[in-house]
Image (spheres, rainbow, N blue to C red):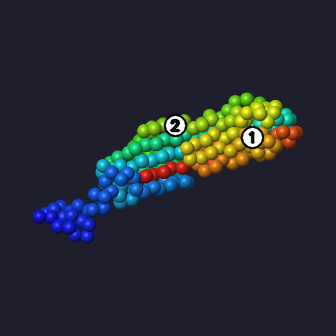
């Protein structure tokens, strides 16, 4: 005959904790944000040191930096940086594999006047010998290229999402010319346009992306003055269990 003791049911020599029963089917209860580090060894908490336990990891690459504009052409706009890729992976804990190695992608640096932006860094985890990677966004191109920066790659996950492209570099001939110089977006980060680039209101340097993995805006020159682009934002790794 079973007895109830402080929320715990005891059946002979078998003890079943009521907290476990209550948690069944309730989904992930804990979240950890990893915002910096390269080749870091992360050790699982006790809740994940159980073979068969489930966990989810969201991986976002770093955003690319926006390009600077040139002083030689009125209306020139540097391209926005591409956003980082996104990987969502569901994993099951394997015996004696109670942690993973992770790297968080760095932000892409801003491009100086008439200079391309730098690419964002890749974010990744390695669990039980398998690598899951969200690439960083490309740096924004200069005015003369007339192209846009690619978003980061995404490989290995349950769901792989390529990062958003940055706004095109080029020449804006009116305030209705389009969204030049806009940084690419991620689900958790928004690329900003230049102060003018992307919004085409006035000359100015690009605006830094917001939150995680977004591209930086390109600089915009409404007159004969060059402006720098802006940096992207760092990547992110989210562990849920």
Q: Which residue occupies 17% across, 67% down?
A: 3
Q: What secondary structure is found at the residue carrying circle 1?
A: loop
Q: Is residue 184 left or right of residue 237?
A: right
Q: Is residue 192 left or right of residue 92?
A: right
Q: Nearer the viewer, residue 154 or 29?
A: 29
Q: What secondary structure is found at the residue carrying circle 2?
A: strand
Q: Which quadrant would residue 89 be assigned to in this image?
A: top left
Residue that lies at the very extreme toward the right in this rendered image: 224
Q: Position of residue 229 (x, y in %)?
A: 74, 44
Q: Which residue occupies 45% across, 55% down?
A: 31
Q: Which residue is mark 2?
A: 161
Q: Residues within 10 Å of mark 2 (few under 14, many from 20)?
A: many
Residue that lies at the very extreme toward the bottom in this rendered image: 6
Q: Which quadrant would residue 22 be assigned to in this image?
A: bottom left
Q: Position of residue 2 (x, y in %)?
A: 15, 64
Residue that lies at the very extreme toward the left in this rendered image: 1
Q: Position of residue 193 (x, y in %)?
A: 71, 42
In the picture, the disc for residue 24 is: none
Q: Quadrant of the N terminus?
A: bottom left
Q: Which residue occupies 60% across, 47% down?
A: 189
Q: Is residue 123 shown above or below 11?
A: above
Residue 84 visible in the shown view: yes
Q: Which residue is mark 1?
A: 199
Q: Is residue 229 left or right of residue 214?
A: right
Q: Nearer the viewer, residue 30 or 137?
A: 30
- Cβ atoms at labels 1 and 2 below 8 Å apart: no
Q: Is residue 137 left or right of residue 115?
A: left
């Amino acid at each position: 005959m079973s007895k109830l003791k402080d929320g715990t049911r005891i059946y002979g020599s078998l003890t079943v904790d009521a907290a476990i029963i209550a948690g069944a089917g309730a989904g992930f209860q804990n979240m950890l944000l990893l915002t910096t580090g390269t080749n870091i060894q992360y050790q699982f908490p006790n809740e994940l040191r159980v073979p068969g336990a489930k966990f989810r990891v969201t991986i976002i690459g770093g955003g690319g930096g926006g390009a600077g504009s040139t002083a030689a052409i009125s209306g020139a706009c540097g391209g926005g940086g591409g956003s980082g890729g996104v990987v969502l992976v569901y994993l099951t804990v394997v015996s004696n594999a109670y942690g993973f190695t992770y790297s968080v992608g760095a932000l892409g640096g801003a491009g100086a006047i008439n200079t391309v932006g730098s690419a964002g860094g890749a974010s990744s985890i390695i669990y039980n010998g398998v690598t899951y990677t969200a690439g960083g966004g490309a740096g924004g191109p200069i005015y003369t290229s007339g192209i846009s920066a690619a978003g980061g790659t995404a490989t290995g996950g349950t769901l792989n999402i390529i990062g958003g492209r940055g706004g095109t570099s080029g020449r804006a001939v009116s305030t209705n010319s389009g969204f030049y110089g806009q940084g690419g977006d991620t689900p958790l980060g928004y690329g900003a346009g230049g102060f003018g680039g992307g919004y085409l209101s006035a000359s100015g340097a690009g605006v830094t992306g917001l939150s995680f993995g977004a591209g930086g805006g390109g600089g915009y020159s409404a007159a004969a003055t060059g402006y720098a682009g802006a940096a992207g934002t760092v990547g992110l790794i989210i562990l849920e269990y």
